[in-house]
Amino acid sequence: MPRPARTVARRTSRLRAAALAGVLAASTLAVVAGSGAGSTAASGPVVSAASAPGSSAPARQARKAQRQNVVTPGNFTGYGFDQCHAPNQATMDTWLQSSPFLAVGIYIDGASRFCREQPNLTPQWISTQLANGWKLLPITLGPQASCQPRFPRWGNDPTIDPTRDPATGTFVNAYNQGVAQATQSVGVAGGLGIVAGSTLWYDLEGFNMANTPCRESALSFLSGWSTQIRALGYVSGVYSSAGSGIKMLDNARVNRPAAYALPDQIWIARWDGAANTSTSYIRPDGWAKARVKQYQGGHNEKWGGVTINIDRNYLDLGTGSVAEREVNCGGVRLVSRAYAALKPATATYVPARRQVKALQCLLQQRGVYAGTIHGRYGKATVAAVNAWQAQHGQKVRPAWTKRSWVTLLSAGDTPVVKFGSTGPAVRRLQRALVAAGRGQAEFRAVRATGVFDPTTDRALRAWQRKVKVEVSGVAGTQTWTALQAGKR
């Protein structure tokens, strides 16, 4: 609908202000237990500060974990899945180690969702997944378009009101339904520990675009949703079919850009099997770098011996997967297309200065070299080399081998990283793969960008195949263990 007339705007403004105050109060005093049984209430009991189990150690740890939660999904390019029920922790851990997915859609709210019961969905579940590196896509499936034949699903779940307000000629009831649903969903998200700045997604199932009251009221509902989601500090997202809800939003963006509050991000349901964010149903300039595409519908997938029924998604959000710039040892460059074997200088051989400086820097970072980083392979460097060799079960000798490079370059923590991951662990993996290669093109092509890209994926799979670990394109426990043992 066009935005409400002035008197309606004042009314909805007061509603938003009151809702914001209520949501902030609830997020301070409430604990959402399990995220609820699908009632139209705010999804959980309000527990006063006095009666909440705040004095117990587990409760204090849970609150601390929530305070450390990161914005989700944030900037990301990669693969995701969504499933009706939030999987249990064992499944999430197995799929993190074995599957290509790093994002997961979860139904947190909405009276029309099929999985009203979510026994696994708790604040602890949210904190654990975020800490493990998962990107979460929190989904609400509430009131649906009035011409959608499958809703109301349960009989007691409302649909979007398709009637015009006689005073303004607008779909103000639908707009206010969207505001109310957004208020409720923010309360649920906050109770689960999904922090402000995260994207909350509204699931509007496909409907008949030719039905004007149905279409316009749905658009008004989503306008209310986006307005209120942003007012409460979150990012507005909308999921819908490419040929109905998403096309409707894109038409409004182009033809009536000032009439509606549009979502910040869109999630396109288009089961064309193409792992990208494109579809012919909307214009290519709409929501650039703010798209998710569900490119494959419900099917069983098995990873690590665990099977679940999922939809597949491809995400390209924000800046995409981008790593922060690194600085090592006051500016020493660690990037190399090849890591050479090194030994003390002789009359006919002088080790490359850049290689030695990289070695000295890395050994210094691991606490076994305290000398100056000057690029000369002298006694202090040999002593540090010997210390590293002794610590890692290698033959102690003056020479530094390519296997030793692999152990040193991969040393450190061992988080799961896969396509779409970013950060220092990805750079360590990339450098270790270069050192582990034996001159093959797929290894020479890798650059230590800190972004797990298709080139890194190809090199990792080639290395996994060569050293006979699970060929998954995922650097998990098995891969890190083999790299840190120097396998090449």
Image (cartoon, grey):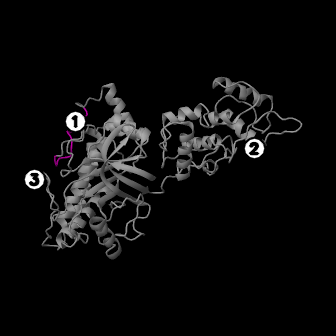
Determine the residue located farthest toward the bottom in the rendered image.
255
**C-alpha distance separating marks 3 and 1:** 29 Å
**C-alpha distance separating marks 1 and 2:** 61 Å
Position of residue 117 measured from the top left corner of the image (x, y, whole percent) = 20, 41
Is 410 on the left-hand or right-hand side of 329?
A: left
The quadrant of the image that shows the N terminus is bottom left
Secondary structure under tag 3 reads loop
What is the three-letter code of the residue carrying label 2? Answer: Arg
**C-alpha distance separating marks 3 and 2:** 71 Å
Q: Which residue is mark 3?
A: 155
User: Visible in this render: residue 451?
Assistant: no
Tell me which label, 3 or 1, sits earlier in the chain: 1
Position of residue 228 measured from the top left corner of the image (x, y, whole percent) = 28, 57
Q: Mark number for residue 354?
A: 2
- Residues in magenta? 39-49
Secondary structure under tag 1 reads loop
Answer few, some or many: residues within 10 Å of disc 3's Cα (few below 14, many 20 plus, some between 14 and 19).
few
Q: Is residue 249 above or below residue 40?
A: below
Q: Mark number for residue 47?
A: 1
Is 208 on the left-hand or right-hand side of 252?
A: left
Determine the residue located farthest toward the right in the rendered image.
347
User: Visible in this render: residue 379?
Assistant: yes
Position of residue 11 measured from the top left corner of the image (x, y, whole percent) = 20, 63
> Residue visible at 52% across and 48% down?
457
Position of residue 338 measured from the top left corner of the image (x, y, whole percent) = 69, 45
Answer few, some or many: residues within 10 Å of disc 1's Cα (few below 14, many 20 plus, some between 14 and 19).
some
